[in-house]
Image (spheres, helix red, strand yellow):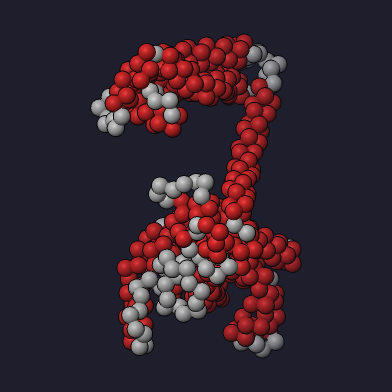
Amino acid sequence: MILTGVLLAVIGLGLVGWFAARGRARLLYSGRGSMHSMPNYHGWHMALWIIVPALIAWTAWSAIMPGLVDGVVMADPAAASLPADAMHRNAIMAEARTLAANPDAAAFNPEARTIAEPLRAATTRYGLIGALIIGIVAFAGGAFGFTRIRPDFRARTHVERAVLGLLLLASLMAILTTFGIVASLLFEAGMFFKDVSPIAFLTGTHWSPGNAIGTDIDDNFGAVPLFWGTIYIGAIIAMVVAIPLGLMSAIFLTQYASHRVRRWVKPILEILAGIPTVVYGYFAALTVAPIIRDFGATLGMANPSTESALAAGLVMGVMIIPFVSSMADDALAAVPRAMSDGSLALGATKSETIKKVLLPAALPGIVAGVMLAISRAIGETMIVVMAAGAAARLSANPFASMTTVTYQIVQMLTGDQEFNSPKTLSAFALGLVLFIVTLVLNIIALRVVKKFREAYD
């Protein structure tokens, strides 16, 4: 809490330093010849020298401080009653930290209240020490920045280099995050494949992780039903809905709708992309699924299930209509006007021009939109969780309940799980397969878009 307050104070000090440096630059050098940099750059230079070193000191102290506090607490006589087991001791320390921050909080272990007061005192002491260190660093940086204010100082160059460095750091963070995700998936999936054969995982047709014990463990991790459910719901049923509706809406908006109609209809259509997926899930579970069940009963099905692949796929298709429509809209609009004018001049009707000229020319862009929509659909979770069911079934019956890769990942990683068991580690193997499939689809879509753009640039 103390360090957070100090960080906010440093940001405020940086703002004060900006005004001070800017005012000094204006006061000392106004009317005395030219300056290399404007006063604003001097202000930013000083603010950076206050905030950046203080932020580095704050980060370093935040990493060091917990170890120092724990060392002091463990040396206190009150900690003599703590158990030797590391897991139990860490649980008590976690409760003690909660009590140190909020004395009125409940505690399961009595030992936590015993060490809460030493922990609070040590945290306050080291927090004040850290605040002093950060304050000294901030003032030292500000003093250095203030002494640099002079006519020939290249403040603009230094500020632009600092901003470039921050942008580079932000880019590296995104790249490193991606590498971290991939490395985590590979590591955990590798641990899973030590116990389960990759061939059995990718080709088996029986999925029952709860029964995976003994020597028949490979027989219970056949992921083909999960892959089939993902493809059937996200890439077949959803696309049957999304492709015709999205493509026809794009044709209407680009070729037939007036400017006023397009101005109103296109934003309304794109609102579908902004609706949270949990809302789609509720809609699928409470509205669409009962209708599908009743329709199945009218067809003579015995005991049709409320949870079905058809219910989830229909709602998922509606959800991704904006992806198909937007890409098809852009692709049709990018076709040179001379192609459609030439077709009309030769006597073709508007519908014939659309069917034989515009759609073939815009096909790469439309295909790219469909590929992106598929990658979005197969990664959907909430609609499947709430409407498709949990049965790993290898069936083409759209009225049957099915499950997908994303549903199983959610099921394996929620609740109290043992993270060293094949059952839990299977979620990472499924995630790795889903990541690879989505990556391949995105690469294909980007290559198609690139070729499409090159054709009409």
**In the displayed structure, would residue 282 be above or below residue 248?**
above
Q: Is residue 146 above or below residue 402?
A: above
- Left or right of 102, for residue 200: right
Q: Residue 39 or 202: which is nearer the viewer?
A: 202
Residue at the spot 42% in from the left edge and 65% down from the top edge: 390
Please state the horizontal and vertical placement of residue 54, each as a whole percent of the image. Answer: 54, 20
Asked if one can make out residue 55 in the rendered structure from this viewpoint, the answer is: no
Identity of the residue drawn at 29% across and 32% down: 108
Q: Is residue 130 above or below residue 293?
A: above
Q: Which residue is the extreme one toward the left?
A: 104
Q: Position of residue 250 (x, y in %)?
A: 54, 72
The N terminus sits in image quarter:
top left
Q: Position of residue 338 (x, y in %)?
A: 70, 74
**Residue 171: percent from left, percent from top:** 63, 40
Evaluate whether residue 188 shows in this view.
yes
Which residue shows up at 42% across the image and 51% down it?
Answer: 414
Asked whether 172 or 249 is in front, the reply is: 172
Tell me if residue 443 comes above or below residue 424 in the rendering: below
- How many numbered markers are drawn? 0
Residue 71 vs residue 363: left or right? Answer: left
Q: As rendered, which of 305 and 349 lies closer to the eye?
A: 305
| Image quarter of the C terminus | bottom right
Q: Quadrant of residue 49?
A: top right
> Which residue occupies 55% across, 14% down?
137
* Front-lying residue, 450 or 427: 427
Q: Toward which corner of the image does residue 145 lie, by quadrant?
A: top right
